[in-house]
Amino acid sequence: MNSDLNYEIKYLNSDVDKEIIQKYWKIDSSKIKWKYNIDEVAKMKGFKMRQLSNYIKNNSELFLKCAECNKLIGVYTQKSQIQMIEFVEKEGFICNQCYEKSNKTKIIKEYIVKEVEPKYSKEDKLNFAFKTKQWKDLNQTELEVLIKIAESTSKNEMYSKIFPNGNINNKFYWSILKRLENQNLIWVDREGKKVIYIHKHGDLYKQLLKEYPHLIIERNDIIPPKKYSFTLEKFDKKKENQPNFTGKIKLSSNIELKKNTVYDCSAWINKKDNLYIRINEE
């Protein structure tokens, strides 16, 4: 199979850093893998991962063409949009039509009349993605979602961590899950349109904890709620400078009030003459 690489980088602005863009998109065609991961490229220029991903997305496009027929395979703005294992399975950077044509030729020559089974199972692809650390080609947001999945032990826990305010119809986060699935970092088990379970590699959490302890420790240490409320009992004050309401509260989780964040605060007296206070992040 032809493993030659046929691609073109389009620069969207005239004053871009072409060197960093070229390194980001550099592919080792002999091994069918990226030459550099995002971490490596970011460190070369002092970028953070999120900054680099946004820079590439806003300043370049990769046009990948078939090495056999020169047909355009796709236009990409992020590495995570390219399912590299697809080309590993095809043994080259070729389009689906050329791959199917090549397989049909093999079948005719061998006098085999049967459906060709996939070369790799979903479990094989999951193991391949883990072994080759495909998470290194994710942008910051995608990596954070993957970490949430790795931390979770059930579908409900995954959903509560991934989707803000419990909105499981959030298209943005479903698009991230789709990209993670395309990278074979997860395997979504579906029954029609219904998601049954999201599979992951058994050692994914352990490996991500080893490589990104700061992200995981922060997330486990601080769980910022979107809404918090508490009640203070009416205080029978004896002096003028004493409070009208007082009380002790026990937190069920850690709270983080962020600098420069706007909070919607409300307070009212309930039927027991106690003060009820609620804080919402806008």
Image (cartoon, helix red, strand yellow):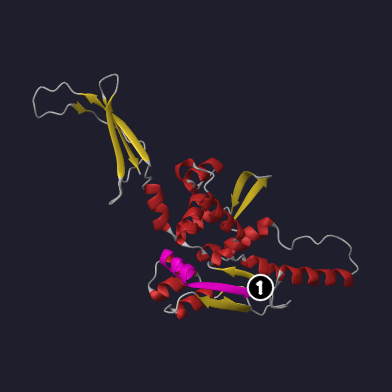
| Outermost residue to the right | 111
Q: Is residue 237 above or below residue 281?
A: above
On the image, which quarter does residue 212 sit in?
bottom left
Can residue 224 be found in the magenta stretch? no
Q: Where is residue 132 in the image (x, y as percent from the top left)?
A: 57, 66
- Magenta residues span 50-64
Q: Where is residue 251 in the image (x, y as percent from the top left)?
A: 32, 36
Residue at (62% x, 67% y) in the render: 84
For the image, the number of numbered tags is: 1
For label 1, the residue is: 72
On the image, which quarter does residue 126 sit in?
bottom right
Residue at (25% x, 21% y) in the render: 273
- Return the residue nearer the eye: 218 or 259: 259
Residue at (66% x, 73% y) in the render: 72
- Return the residue nearer the eye: 33 or 99: 99
Q: Where is residue 7 in the image (x, y as percent from the top left)?
A: 61, 77
